[in-house]
Amino acid sequence: MAMKKCNLAFLPADGAGHIASTLEFAKRLLLHPSAAGRLSVTFLLMPVCASSFFSLNPPSSATDIAVHLLPDLAVPSRLETDGGEDYISLAFQLYAPHVKSALAATAPAALIIDFFATTVIDAARDLQIPTYVFFSTNATLLALMLHLPALHDEIPEEFELLQGEIKVPGLAAGIPPTSMPTPLMNKKNRCYTWLVYHGKRFKDVRGIIPNTLRAFEPQVLSALESDRSVPPVHPVGPVLCLDRAGGGGERHECLQWLDAQPAASVVFLCFGSLSRMTEAQTAETAVGIERSGRRFLWSLRLAESEGDGRPPAGFREATNGRGMVVEEWVPQAAVLAHAAVGGFVTHGGWNSCLESLWFGVPMVTWPMGAEQHLNAMMMAAEMGVAAEMEIDRHRGNWATAKEVEMKLNWLMGESEDVRKVRERVREMKVASRAAVEIGGPSYDGLGSLVTEFKRLPEQ
Ligand code: UDP
């Protein structure tokens, strides 16, 4: 008789940074030898997630992942809410009764949620289904969020009015107020309220699974593990979706252009799936790039209200042959993997940081929103794998042309400082790969999770 499979339900958020790694994590669980074909996965999808999910996981995919489409609800648009974190948290809250019906219908052994979906924990608990959080970013943000309810009680004023660092257990140096995540910079905004709420609710789950690895954040992970009020933390990273680089079909023209450039000579600038540059910042950045004299590949996306999406007049001529501007989605992982790329100017989204370290590319971080300012601080101060662009947060994270020029020259230059960063990046590349190899810490962590799931009582 065929043994019954242990079914896991996943509830992902939309957004490239969340859904892709959640899906990849699910695949890795299914393919882990400890699963031995005894796990199955069902994705509970809000309609807003469906198109990105199916583009990432076409039905012909080797791993068998079922989909339960949630009904189409009237969810406020992003613009009607206080921001991205408010929008997605509110959407999950509105969907909670439907998630409950879906759980009752599919009877999974466990529910694995996006970290903005903690409002569904109670629905799962009513059905005696344990909830886990797939935390698609790092343990530093996790430690901060877990401590937020206490910070909320202790500190009534805005964080940026504080002198000195914000103390968080596990983060020895604390967090400078200017490095706090964007949704925490205005306490009257509902994004802040939601993050405090989620931080509180993380204590109500069976386990938290951050997309990180011990070698990146040893202290903070130890602190989380030794805190008995925190559920077990299972670092399984780096969970990367490298096949999105687009197998099949023609190689992107930017890769062909890179083929013709000398090794480690090109600086790659790319700011994630959501960030858009204003026309003024584009013009300023163009001056910095031009003056640096460096070879570059610039993935440029302008805000919709801005211009026609092109770099300033004369820029292409001035940098003719030395650079390429792409005004659409670029295959970032394939670019970072290319031997011609020697540095990465990134907004510091966590997936971008993980990819850069996987391919051993040193970074300059230029955060734009979400938790990116925190990631930037952590990459530079804690991990020593990046330098931070000096920006004006009160002016839309503005960087001057001079600063862009200086940081490009630093990144692609030969100073003692950048050589040290390159060395650290090489170490982190080795650690990333070792973590997910057979017998590596994240590989084994995944195996323990699989074993834990298989032992859960059947519904
Ligand atoms: N990405 C890409 N091409 C682009 C922009 C982004 O392939 O032009 C990918 C990138 O490789 C990463 C993801 O989209 O895997 C962005 O995730 P991240 O967490 O870095 O930032 P977010 O988009 O969530 O701000």
Image (cartoon, rainbow, N blue to C red):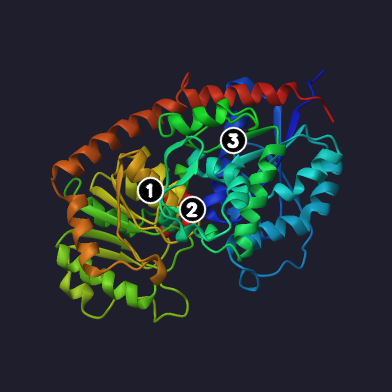
Looking at the image, is mark 3 or mark 1 earlier in the sequence? 3
**Residue 301 percent across, percent down from the top left:** 40, 68
Q: Is residue 193 left or right of residue 394?
A: right
Indicate if the residue with disc 2 has its beta carbon within 8 Å of ligand 1: no
Indicate if the residue with disc 3 has its beta carbon within 8 Å of ligand 1: no
Looking at the image, is mark 2 or mark 1 earlier in the sequence? 2
Helix, strand or loop for disc 1? helix
Q: Which mark is residue 209?
A: 3
Mark 2 = which residue? 371
User: Gap in Å between the C-alphas at discs 2 and 1?
Assistant: 10 Å
Helix, strand or loop for disc 2? loop
Quick check: which quadrant has ligand 1?
Answer: bottom left
**Residue 13 percent across, percent down from the top left:** 63, 52
Q: Nearer the viewer, residue 170 or 94?
A: 170
Q: Amino acid at mark 2?
A: Glu
**Marks 3 and 1: CB-CB under 8 Å?**
no
Q: Nearer the viewer, mark 3 or mark 2?
A: 2
Q: Amino acid at mark 1?
A: Met
User: Gap in Å between the C-alphas at discs 3 and 2?
Assistant: 17 Å
Mark 1 = which residue? 377
Identity of the residue drawn at 76% across and 27% down: 5
Identity of the residue drawn at 63% across and 26% down: 449
User: Gap in Å between the C-alphas at discs 3 and 1?
Assistant: 22 Å
Give the vertical position of 452 relative to 15 (above or below): above
Whether residue 114 is visible, yes or no, is no
Identity of the residue drawn at 33% across and 45% down: 380
Helix, strand or loop for disc 3? strand
Q: Residues within 10 Å of mark 3 (few under 14, many from 20)?
A: many
